[in-house]
């Protein structure tokens, strides 16, 4: 089963592709968009859930998003149009690492998509190239909440893939960024995200038992659930940082 098919199905119940509640997303956006007329870019926007939330209630806001998945971008456009926001949102299908922005942005988002750039610091360097003077970044990435156990490598993680939270913030600061706000995802947010991921994919497979990908979808959901429960639950944390751009 192609990954491009798995992601839309696994995020049906949780469009934000990260362990963040709707309330946390709104709080982060409220802090990052104080004027309500900013220009926003989402690098790795998936179905544009962050951008739709940002545009809602902010009639002066304009936004762009880019993602490799044609199906995700199409769903994002449909969601924006259904909410009456399509005239203020432009979504692009393509590689976020090579995206040439038409103008600088007041806020650049990269939440749960830093892997596309090779990690947290490279993602921040890419975001910096899109920022207007005085702009900020909302970036979300993993960190080790505690020392990885023996089950963590089996879940697909290397022990040195992340650092603890303090070291993560230190690395970001050493790269010239100033944190102005952060949100550490709660265990409830993690559990809601993971049960939604595995649950929606499993439900689709059970409801479409005759589909040629149904058995594979159930296998993927089961494997992901086992990796989470036995490998990284309450070990891998997730932090979303609002960072002010370094002075040029």
Image: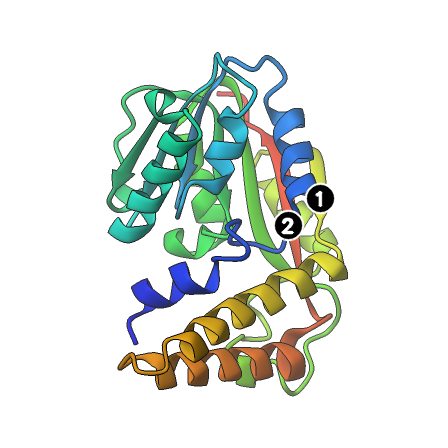
Residue 79 as seen in the image, left or right of residue 99? right
Task: State whether residue 164 appears in this view.
Answer: yes
User: In the displayed structure, would residue 206 be above or below residue 15?
Assistant: below
User: In the displayed structure, would residue 58 be above or below residue 40?
Assistant: above
User: In the displayed structure, would residue 19 be above or below residue 144?
Assistant: above
Q: Which residue is mark 1?
A: 183
Disc 2 to disc 1, C-alpha distance: 9 Å
User: In the displayed structure, would residue 47 be above or below residue 220?
Assistant: above
Task: State whether residue 178 appears in this view.
Answer: no
Residue 191 as seen in the image, left or right of residue 206? right
Label ID, residue 83: none
**Front of the two marks 2 and 1:** 2
In which quadrant of the rendered view does residue 152 lie? bottom right
Residue at x-position 43% and y-position 57%: 115
Residue at x-position 58% and y-position 64%: 196
**Residue contact between numbered discs 2 and 1, judged by CB atoms under 8 Å:** yes
Residue 2 as seen in the image, left or right of residue 32? left
SS under mark 2:
loop
Residue 112, position in %: x, y?
51, 52
Residue 240, position in %: x, y?
63, 45
Residue at x-position 66% and y-position 50%: 239
Image quadrant in which the N terminus is located: bottom left
SS under mark 1:
strand
Residue at x-position 61% and y-position 76%: 228
Q: Which residue is mark 2?
A: 20
Residue 57, position in %: x, y?
56, 20
Residue 169, position in %: x, y?
67, 46
């Amino acid at each position: 089963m192609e990954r491009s098919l798995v992601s839309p199905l696994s995020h049906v119940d949780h469009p934000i592709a990260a362990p963040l509640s709707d309330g946390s997303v709104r709080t982060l956006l409220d802090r990052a968009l104080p004027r309500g007329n900013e220009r926003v870019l989402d690098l790795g926007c998936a179905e544009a859930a962050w951008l739709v939330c940002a545009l809602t209630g902010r009639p002066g806001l304009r936004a762009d998003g880019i993602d490799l998945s044609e199906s995700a971008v199409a769903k994002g456009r449909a969601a924006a149009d259904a909410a009456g926001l399509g005239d203020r949102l432009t979504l692009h299908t393509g590689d976020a690492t090579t995206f040439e922005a038409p103008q600088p942005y007041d806020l650049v988002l990269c939440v749960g998509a830093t892997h596309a750039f090779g990690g947290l610091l490279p993602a921040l360097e890419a975001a910096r190239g899109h920022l207007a003077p005085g702009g900020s970044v909302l970036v979300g990435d993993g960190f080790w909440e505690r020392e990885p156990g023996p089950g963590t490598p089996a879940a697909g993680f290397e022990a040195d893939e992340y650092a603890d939270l303090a070291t993560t913030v230190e690395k970001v600061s050493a790269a010239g960024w100033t944190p102005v706000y952060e949100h550490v995802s709660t265990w409830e947010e993690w559990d809601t995200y993971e049960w939604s991921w595995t649950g929606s994919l499993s439900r689709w497979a059970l409801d479409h038992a005759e589909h040629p990908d149904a058995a594979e979808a159930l296998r993927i959901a089961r494997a992901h659930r086992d990796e989470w429960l036995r490998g990284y639950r309450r070990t891998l944390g997730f932090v979303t940082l609002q960072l002010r751009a370094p002075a040029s």
